[in-house]
Image (cartoon, rainbow, N blue to C red):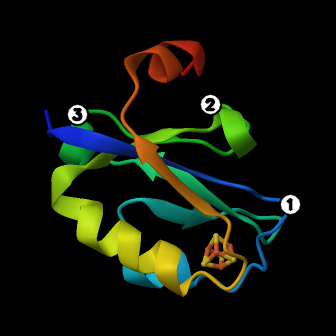
Amino acid sequence: MAETQLMVWIDQDLCTGDGICEEIAPDVFLGRDDGLWVVKEEASHFGKTIIFDGNEAPDGSRGVARVPDSQVADVVDAATECPGECIMIEPYDPEVMAARGA
Ligand code: SF4
């Protein structure tokens, strides 16, 4: 199981759909069929893949993914480059994880 100190979500109201986040950090960001991007947790880091796309797990502000420590630099880079300024990075909070319902 990956160590994690941060979590990330996307404010999809602001997402421009350019896909820069996935280009920089494909283990954490994924394009959805409707042209918006979502966050995910990869099995290679967490033992199970969870995609926060509103189907099996919530999306938007409740679609909060853990960021493996090995991906922090890329996720911060993606947030910096994101033209919508809609990649939200927060300190890891177990209570948020418990409430997300995934
Ligand atoms: S970089 Fe930002 S605006 Fe672009 S697809 Fe990713 S979340 Fe959306």
Which disc number belongs to residue 69? none
Q: Determine the image quadrant of residue 15.
A: bottom right
Residue at the spot 67% in from the left edge and 86% down from the top edge: 83
Where's residue 97, x and y in %?
A: 46, 22
Where's residue 81, x and y in %?
A: 52, 86
Residue at the spot 62% in from the left edge and 30% down from the top edge: 57
In the picture shown, does residue 64 fall above or below 100? Answer: below
Q: In terms of image quarters, where does ligand 1 lie?
A: bottom right
User: Label 1 to label 3, Cα distance in Å?
Assistant: 30 Å
Q: Is mark 2 within 8 Å of ligand 1?
A: no
Where's residue 48, x and y in %?
A: 32, 33
Task: Report the mark closest to the observer, 1 or 3.
Answer: 1
User: What is the crowding at mark 2: few (fewer than 14 residues within 10 Å), some, or many (at least 20)?
Assistant: some
Kind of residue at badge 2 = Ala
Find numbered disc 3 in the image and state the secondary structure of the residue it sits on.
Answer: loop
Kind of residue at badge 3 = Gly
Name the quarter where the C terminus is drawn: top right
In the picture shown, does residue 101 fall above or below 77? Answer: above
Q: Are marks 3 and 2 in contact (CB under 8 Å)?
A: no
Disc 2: which residue = 57
Q: Nearer the viewer, residue 95 or 39?
A: 95
Name the quarter where the N terminus is drawn: top left
Disc 3: which residue = 47
Q: Are marks 2 and 1 in contact (CB under 8 Å)?
A: no
Which residue appears farthest toward the front when viewing the image?
A: 91
Which disc number belongs to residue 13? 1
Residue at the spot 73% in from the left edge and 78% down from the top edge: 84
User: Label 2 to label 1, Cα distance in Å?
Assistant: 18 Å
User: What is the crowding at mark 3: few (fewer than 14 residues within 10 Å), some, or many (at least 20)?
Assistant: few
Q: Is residue 96 left or right of residue 61?
A: left
